[in-house]
Image (tube, rainbow, N blue to C red):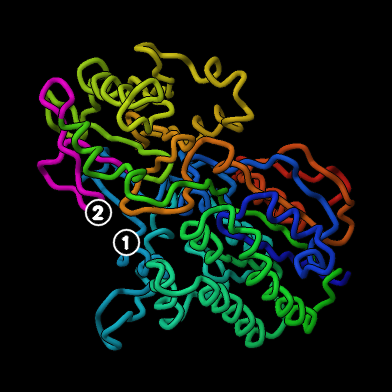
Amino acid sequence: MSKKRLVFIDIDGINPQVLYDMLDEPGSNLGRIAGRGARVERAVTVFPAVTLCCQASMFTGTWPGTHGILGNSWWDRFSKPPRFRYYTDARTAMGNYGYAMFGWPTILLPRKPGLQFANDDLSKSVETIYEMAHRKGLRSMQVFNQYSRGVDNWVVPSRTAMILFALAHEELLHNRHWDKATFAHLFRAMRKGGELPDLIAFYISGHDNNSHEHGAHDQAQYFKNFVDPLFGRFIAEFEKHAPLEDLYFLITSDHGQANTIKDQEHVVDHALLGQILGAVGGGGFQLAARKKVLPTDTAIGNMEAGATQFHLINRETFNWADPPRFEQDIMPVAESFSHYGKSGGRPPFVDLLLVRPAPDQGYMVFENGALTDLETYFADKDEQYPDAVRRVRGLECKRSGDIIVILDYSQGYYFGDKPKAGEHGNLCAADALIPFVVSGPGIADQTIPFASLIDAVPTAGALLGFDTSKAQGRNILPHGDE
């Protein structure tokens, strides 16, 4: 092979068995791309298992507590003034790609390249895979992902594609139209760019939204009917530039997906959480709205479908810069949520509670009125909560939540605003497990027992020969396969 090139494919929300079955299916296009090579038997994402958090780990090789994106929303009580970010409303979703909602000269969706919320919020102490590759003198291209810091060619959705995304997100348009647009943008960029760059990162996200709409059980049919045919065109485009066997491929996902019950009864919404916090002993807490924090609010809930991080004000000083008191503020909230567990809560949506005495201390599990350290609680629960201790420890930082409520999918419940058939965000296996495949020249057919999402960057670095020492993961390939 004259030159090493890596195509890094990121398929949002796909469960590992769906991907592995498609790789093994005779005649599948994905099988032609990566049916041979290294496959991880048990690969695990970070926590919380949601897009903006996991994508940041995927492309920096660091834990959330290090890169600073702690979910699809977060609150920083220690900044001056305190900062709140909510990534998934229309304004910030567009802003992640450098679009404003309204303005000049186009009125609708004017380009604002300086408006890149996710890129700007990513900690400056970490490096992206593109910055690492650039130090080696390698060229990179990234298609449709929110994180692009340091990339040579960032292919963002067109205005038309952003409208398709919005319609698909609201379940007004089939997600295949958004995925088709994603592939079309990649092909257009390849035709314009001449020689292929050394690193191409390609983000496919319609698959995840389809799972929200129809459930994780629909993934295999959606992928087979709509995504795999697009990979047929993908092969044809790449073979215009280089033989497939000369390319490395790394394929993974940001998180998994759990089936949920799509009715209003099983939505644990903001109003219910506000009622629980408002009734906490000692005067209660006023829960901020999901998208905006007011000066009178005394609790912020960063709601993901499978978990919510709560930040509580110190009810003695009413100053966010002062951490809440453990006995007087945090523990009463933990006690209140414990009544909504499997043993008889109405509704019984709580699986487990994580609390910590202070921002500089680690989380512990609150159970039956007592605290248990993570290592003890999760010692025999790896099948149910894969790599849980490392994932929780990887979230810990000054601005992670004072208490984290982990939801119980087995009862059909999920945090949110409206009914969904599939969700994620949890510590549980359905959300945690992801595919992880590496193929290409010299990569032996093999099964690797375990990997973490943060291992993707070091593995890519080993393939292309760039330094990944700032990443916290490891190269998963045995010596000689790189």
Q: Is residue 289 above or below residue 381?
A: below
- Name the residue tied to disc 1: 89
> Image point 14% across, 26% down: which residue?
315
Tell me, for residue 324, which label it has, or none.
none
Residue 188 colored in magenta in the image: no
The answer to whether the residues at label 2 and label 1 have Cβ atoms under 8 Å apart is: yes
Q: Can residue 159 be seen in this view?
A: yes
> Image point 55% across, 30% down: which residue?
388
On screen, residue 257 versus residue 235, left or right, reads: left
Residue count near mark 1 (Cα–Cα under 10 Å), binned few <14, some 14–19, many ≥20: few
> At numbered mark 2, what does the secondary structure look like: helix, strand or loop?
loop
In-front residue for pair 1/136: 1
On screen, residue 143 versus residue 19, left or right, reads: left
| Real-space CA distance between mark 2 and mark 1, rounded to the nearest whole angstrom | 8 Å
Q: Can residue 59 be seen in this view?
A: no
User: Residue 304: x percent and y percent?
Assistant: 39, 45
Residue count near mark 2 (Cα–Cα under 10 Å), binned few <14, some 14–19, many ≥20: few
For badge 2, the amino acid type reads Lys
Tell me, for residue 291, which label it has, or none.
2
Q: Quadrant of residue 465?
A: bottom right
> Image point 33% across, 63% down: which residue?
92
Q: Report the quarter where the N terminus lies.
A: bottom right
User: Residue 319: x percent and y percent?
Assistant: 15, 33
User: Residue 129: x percent and y percent?
Assistant: 60, 57
Question: Which stretch did the figure color magenta?
Answer: 279-302
> Image point 72% across, 37% down: which residue?
450
For badge 1, the amino acid type reads Asp
Residue 281 colored in magenta in the image: yes
On screen, residue 284 versus residue 415, left or right, reads: left
In-front residue for pair 112/438: 438
